[in-house]
Amino acid sequence: MVVAHEQFEEAVPLYAVGALDRPERQALDVHLLTGCAPCHAALRQFQTVVGLLPYGLPAASPPAGLKTKILTATQEDQAQSEAKKFAEILVQQASQGARLNWRAWIGWMFHPAIILLLILLLAGGTGYAVFLHLRVDQDSSHRQRLEIALQEKGTEVAALKRQVVEQEESLHRLRSEVYSHVGSASELKDTLIHREVELDQLREQFAQQEKDMAALRKSLAQRDEWASFFRSPAVRVVLLSGHERARAAGALILLDPDSRKALLYAYDLPPLPGGKIYQLWAVADRPVSVGMFTVDAGRKARLVVRALPVPSRITLFTVTLEPEGGRSQPTGDVYLSGQP
Amino acid sequence: MRSGKATEEMKRIPDQMAKPDVENTTQSESPPRYASGPLIAELLTRAAKGDQSALRSVYDQTSRLLFALTLRILGSREEASEVLQEVYLDMWRKAIRYDPSRMTALSWLVTVTRNRAVDRLRTRATHGEGTGAQSGDSHAAEAAQGVAAVESIFESERRRAVGKALAELPRTQRQVLELAFYDGLTGSEIAAKLREPVDAITTRIKVGMSKLKVTLGWNGD
């Protein structure tokens, strides 16, 4: 899979500011080598921006002697260069001069005074010429060997260059594959994260559903319980009437001696004063508290009693006003009472 | 040795690697208002041909900017001067050569100088020396010295425009750009330093660079 051009173009600003890691930088290098015009254009723009960045720095002058140091070094370079050129010219001129002198020597050779000297020198000169010829041959052969070696090296370098190009192409392909795999891995990771989030949400929903189910079960159980209570043929009704403190008030108690459950429904009871509460008593041998209750805004009250003490022996139900928290024996005024 | 260093440096200048097909370029090639003009480019070319007066002019026009850059990166006047000297001498000795068809002259000079200074910084870090980065107060002292020199109108205008463009960037974007450009850190190194995800850092750099590009004069691409 090939890395998309857009990915390279996106990396251009990072490349320009020097923020790419080596592998990414090399990948973009290879891409730029393909001559991608949009990437080159973008790079030129971002490099110009980068070139302007130092203008955001506080101004600072370089040391006073730096300019002189640099210019002196360049002058020395130039002087060395000129000296080299001058030396080359001298060598050239000397060579030309030698050729001119040789012509003059040819003229002198016809002078009778030096003919003898020439003859004497001829023998030695011939030997030296042979020596030089052999030396030139040796040099020439050495040079040929060097040239051959140079050509071989050139061929090796070309082969190496080809290998480098091939390696770069291979690297590019590998990098593309790595990018592709990294992309796939990244997608898988995202999917996994997404699934985990969904799973968490499902877990939460499941927990909530279980809570709801438990609440429903409880509610259903209560409904069943009370349905059973109301269907029971043993249920009796006890009416309670209001006393002096609450003449208009009244109440009824549904009582099931078998299950020992009871339900109180009271109405028109006076609102409770602060720190007080109504307490229901079942009187057999003595008053036993069976529950406490308050009244609502409509001056109505309900109380569920799950375990009446010995229902068959109860002779009286009574409601008194007691301090908050209730009492073990009635202490306040009686508001309601009735016999089963 | 210098040529090896120069070769490495050339590799790090992307525009010098492959010439774009300019005729097929679809994006706007108009330079921003504050990009360098052709004068420095011409001087660089002449200096590379051995024209000393051209080198002197290049130095006069660019040395303060490049010195501020090397000083910001290295935090030492001595080292900043050494790097600056290397850059100008390599330019003169043709160890580095400017190609006007591929980058503005100013971008080239800034890029070459920044890379040299960051190389020096990384070498120093490898050798376990202190960073020696200057505080803001030290920069202010440098500024006080430097401002004594005469600034050209164009340079002042550039400073104002670039300063404004940088000031308009959110602090987090400016911070990552500075860490990349001046401290020589890559995106992943910045992420490690700031303990943030790499993606967040690279996005911040891209957005910051794009904003600077638009603010400094490129509106259409």
Image (cartoon, helix red, strand yellow):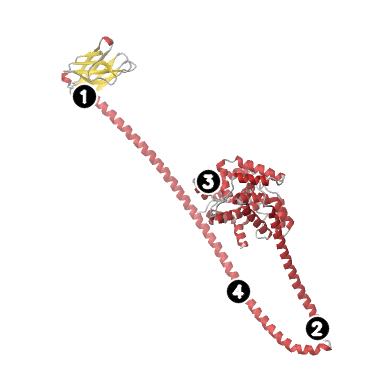
Q: Residue at x 26, y 27 (%)?
A: A222
Q: Give the label, 4 or 3, closer to the camera.
A: 3
Mark-to-mark CA distance, 3 and 2? 86 Å
Query: Mark 4 is on which residue type?
Result: Ala
Chain under numbered label 4: A
| Location of residue A180 with respect to A121 vertically, above or below | above
Q: Secondary structure at mark 4?
A: helix
Q: Residue at x 61, y 63 (%)?
A: B1
Mark-to-mark CA distance, 1 and 2? 154 Å
Q: Which residue is mark 3?
A: B201
Q: Which residue is mark 4?
A: A149
In the picture, the disc for residue A106 is 2
Chain under numbered label 1: A
Chain under numbered label 3: B
Chain under numbered label 2: A
Mark-to-mark CA distance, 1 and 3? 70 Å
Mark-to-mark CA distance, 2 and 4? 42 Å
x and y percent of residue B145 in the render?
67, 46
Q: Are marks 1 and 2 on the same chain?
A: yes
Splitting the image into 4 quarters, where does residue B97 fall? Answer: bottom right
Q: Which residue is mark 1?
A: A307
Mark 1: give few (<14), some (14-19) or many (20+) Cα within 10 Å. few
Query: Mark 1 is on which residue type?
Result: Ala
